[in-house]
Image (cartoon, rainbow, N blue to C red):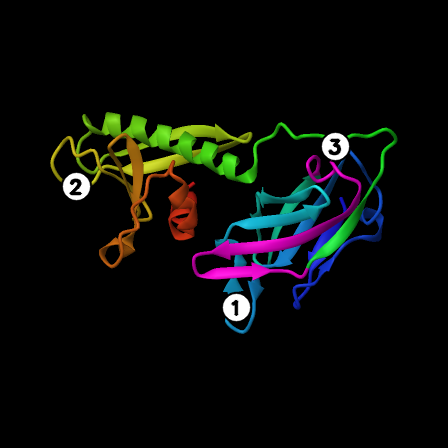
Amino acid sequence: MEKITVDAFRRMYIPIGWRQINIQDDFEAESVIIEVPRYYGSENIDLSKYPMYLKTVSSGGRDDILLSSEVTEDTVSAVWTLCPPQTSYSGDLYLQLRFEGDDLKWETPPAKIEIITSLNAEPVVPTSPSAYDGWLDEMQSIADSVLSLTVSAETAEPDEEVSVEKTLNDDIFNLHFRIPKGEKGDVGTVFSTGETLYWENNALHVKTASSVEENNSLPITSAGVFKEIGNINALLETI
């Protein structure tokens, strides 16, 4: 599989074979690995701690893709499969890699590939959800799981560990919780890493260790929580 790499100056290098072979309306016909050094700058910023996005801009507009990253000792990488809306319009397709959190915004300079015109092609409107909608679906799935656990926690003994296995995007992951020490029936559930989830007013909330200094509790299913990247990372690190 071809590989797009990023150097120490953030420049993206696109393989020659990938610069002009992408055909309008292609759907999952081409895949490429995007690889970036894990640590950057004099402070050795660890990019693996942040969500990895690919920002794309064509004549049809902008679309950001949330990539599923893999981390090694030295690199962060992801597989990007080309499909609409990136192939909906022929011409230049600009790419920009982005890592972003509440304490970091890191981007590469734009690079580009060319989408070649297909005969009698019309722009395809994608039916797949946007990156934002995908996040909402994932968070709702996790929220549903935690709600079922809090219900079972009502009859659990203090300090008893409970868990659930779920499948997300064909990947199986486990959520592990420990009922806090205290009175039986305490429905507050605690991640092993220390983040606390609780159910209130028909919404799942997350409370971080910094909540004493700042109220970071937001419903997982609300748009606001996606602006609190620290909360999202705190949750996803437990998956």
The image shows residue 92 at horizontal and vertical percentages of 78, 48
Using the rendered image of the protein, determine whether residue 238 is visible from the camera's viewpoint. Answer: no
- For disc 3, the neighbor class at 10 Å (few under 14, some 14 to 19, many from 20) is some
Residue on which the image places disc 1: 44
Q: What whole-number distance in Å separates the C-alpha atoms at marks 1 and 2?
A: 39 Å
Is residue 6 depicted above or below 140 in this figure?
below
Q: Which residue sits at x=71%, y=46%?
A: 58
- Which of the labelled discs sits on residue 75, or is there none? none
CA distance separating discs 3 and 1: 43 Å
Q: Quadrant of the N terminus?
A: top right
In this rendering, the label closer to the viewer, 3 or 2 = 3
Q: Amino acid at mark 2?
A: Lys
Q: Which residue is mark 2?
A: 181
**Is 22 rendered above or below residue 228?**
above
In primary-sequence order, the first of circles 1 and 2 is 1
Q: Which residue is at a point 26% across and 53% down the rendered structure image?
A: 211
Magenta stretch bounds: 82-109
- Answer whether labels 1 and 2 touch (C-beta < 8 Å): no
Side of 236 relative to 217 (left or right): right
Q: Is residue 51 visible?
A: yes
Q: Residue furthest right?
A: 119
Residue 115 at x, y percent in the picture? 80, 42
Residue 191 lies left or right of residue 167; in this view the side is left
Does residue 149 belong to the magenta stretch? Answer: no
Callout 3 touching callout 1 (CB < 8 Å): no
Nearer-the-camera pick, 147 or 162: 147
Q: Which residue is mark 3?
A: 123
Q: Where, quadrant-wise, is the C terminus in this rendering? A: top left
Nearest to the eye among marks 3 and 1: give it.
3
